[in-house]
Every structure is written in structure tokens, then in C-alpha cells.
Amino acid sequence: MRLTRSMLKIRYSGFRVVSVLIVALSLAAGPAPAQQDYPNRPIRLITPAAPGGTTDILARLFGAKLTDVLKQQVIVDNRASASGVIAGELTANAAPDGYTLLLAYHQHTVNAALISKLPYHPVNDFTPITQLTAAGLLLMVNPSSPPKNVKEFLEWTRNFKGPLNFGSAGLGSGGHLAGELYNLMAGVKAQHIPYKGTGPALIDLMGGQYHYNFTGLTGGTTLMRAGKLRGIAVTMPKRVAAFPDIPAMAEALPGFEIVGWYGVIGPSKLPKLIVTRLHDEFVKVLKQPDVHERILGVGAEPVGSSPEEFRKYMLGDVAKWAKIVKESGAKRD
């Protein structure tokens, strides 16, 4: 039988209808199987820190807990260098399939203010999943130093005779910017001494090689409890529950506030189903009593925000650090 032009048109139209129906049915069927059975292989949790530090300890804590609940191994991948830029770039360039995540912290947003050619945008090139914790810095001095509290510290630094120095974990670190902000707000001219990491910086503070340091609460509390360093103030807006006797910087210097954070992000365009699964599991781990108490015990606060809340928080953090860097004149190099 010969096919006429009208018969061909009918067959072509029928083919188009069937094709549309197939597409519609596939969409109605829901997410792809790869998303539905997620995770079906190990997950890589990149951490921008060397083994043994606070960031690494937190990554391994959550990695072990998530391995139990997800029934897939969560492997911690330490990528310590370049102020977290290498870890961020690896994550930004990874496939958006949920098998590469980054345990980010506030340096991730600080970098946007200090590094002119950052190879990614700290928010737009990622998918925020949840903010895990919020924690301030701890202003510390050598126990032999005169000030016992934040008001005495303010008076001591303002009237200091001779060169005044503060140390930090490195150029562009939270401690560096906190010191520059203190210079600006307190009207002092302390010189910054950058170290290659928190450990070396605190060792020299114990040895009296410089005068003070703004360090992470989680890293400084052990030395403070051992009496090797003295805690003067926290940079949270108010006192923290774990150390009620240590005042907030704002009590003597209104408006002084530096809040650090840890959170989980992935590559941009992560499927919503995977984001929701990861968010829910991280928050469940965060609420486990032993994890909750461990975080509170080092002066941090558990958060567990939604992906959208975390995105807005990160955008605000980028703007905040840009303002601090501009006003203080801080430089990374």
C-alpha cells in the first residue's frame, strides 16, 4: 500500500502525541532513580584543614555519624592550603550528584573580601545545605599579662608603652581580621604577627612572644582550662553558656562582634531531593545528645538552619567581611 501525504501527516502527528505523552509520564514518575536510591556509594566530605585540627575533628565526628545513618561510608578528605581555596574549588567543580560535599567555615566567605581573583563565588557557585554551628572567637593573653577582664584589656592596650603586637593563625584569618577590627574600634595601633596555623601562634603566646590573640573558641578553651592562657572576652554578641564568667567584647566595646561558623555545602545545582535528604540527616546528627553537648562544651551553638536560611546567612557574611576589610584596611598579602 502506498502512503499518501495525508496519511504521513497523520502518522507524524500521532508520533508527536506519543512522544509528548512519554515525556509527561516520565516527569510524573518523579525523580531519577539515581536520586531515589541516594546514596548508593561512598560520599567524600572535603575539609579545608589538616588532620587533627578543630575543623578535621568536626568533619570526622559528622562523617562517622552519617556513615551510620546513611549506610554508606562518608570519607573525610583533608585539603589544607590556600586558606581553603583549594577545597572550595574542588567542591565547586565536582559533579552535582551529592557525592562531594564541603565542610565549610567562615574563612570561605572571608576569602571573597581578601582574594581578588577567587576562582568561584562563595555562595552562587555552591548549594548551601545547612549551617551546623555558630561560635565566636576568644581573646586570649598570657597569664602573666596585667589585664584580667575586657575593660582592663581595653585600658591596657590603649595606654601601652612601646610596640604592641597581636598574633593570628595567618594572613586573612578570622583572628587577623578581629585584631584589625579591634585596632579600628579601640583606637590602638597593634602590629599583626601572622603564623602558619593556630598551634604555632598559641605556643608563642604562651611563651610571651607577643601580647594577645583572637583565636577560635574550640581551639583556645583547652589551654584556658589548663591555665596556660587567660581568656579575656568572647566575640559573640553576648556571653556563651559554656563560659558564663567570660564577658563579651561588646560589653566594653559596643558593636564589636565576630561570629564564626561551620556548615555543609555542595556544588551548585544539587537536586532538591538530595539537598533535602542531606539537610535532614545532618540536622538529625546535630540533635543527637552527645553531638549537641560536645558542641556546647566548646562554647559553640548548634544551628541546623534550612538551605535557604543558610544561603541568606552566607550572603550576609560576605557583605559583613567586605565591610570589615574595607574599614580596617586589612590585607592578605
Image (cartoon, rainbow, N blue to C red):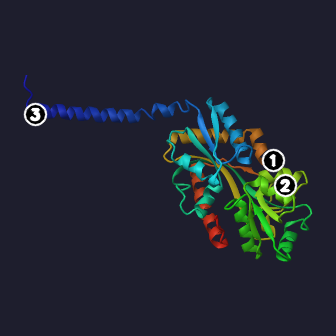
The answer to whether residue 255 shows anywhere in this view is no
Residue 91 position (above or below residue 190): above
Q: Mark 1 and mark 2: span between their CA atoms?
A: 9 Å
Q: Mark 3 and mark 1: span between their CA atoms?
A: 79 Å
Cβ atoms under marks 3 and 1 closer than 8 Å:
no
In front of the other: 159 or 217 = 159
Residue 243 numbered tag: 2
Q: Say what amino acid the circle numbered 1 marks.
A: Gly
Residue drawn at x 89%, y 67% as measured from the top left: 147
Q: Say what amino acid the circle numbered 3 marks.
A: Ser
Q: Mark 2 and mark 3: span between their CA atoms?
A: 85 Å
In front of the other: 83 or 333 = 333
Q: Is residue 34 left or right of residue 136?
A: left
Circle 3 crowding by C-alpha within 10 Å: few under 14, some 14–19, many from 20: few
Q: Earlier in the sequence, mark 3 or mark 1?
A: 3
x and y, in percent, of residue 2 in the image? 7, 25
Q: Say what amino acid the circle numbered 2 marks.
A: Phe
Residue drawn at x 60%, y 64% as measured from the top left: 113
Q: Secondary structure at mark 2?
A: loop
The answer to whether residue 34 shows anywhere in this view is yes
x and y, in percent, of residue 306 in the image? 60, 48
Q: Quadrant of the N terminus?
A: top left
Q: Secondary structure at mark 1?
A: helix
Mark 3, residue position: 6
x and y, in percent, of residue 35 in the image? 50, 34
Q: Earlier in the sequence, mark 2 or mark 3?
A: 3
Mark 1, residue position: 297
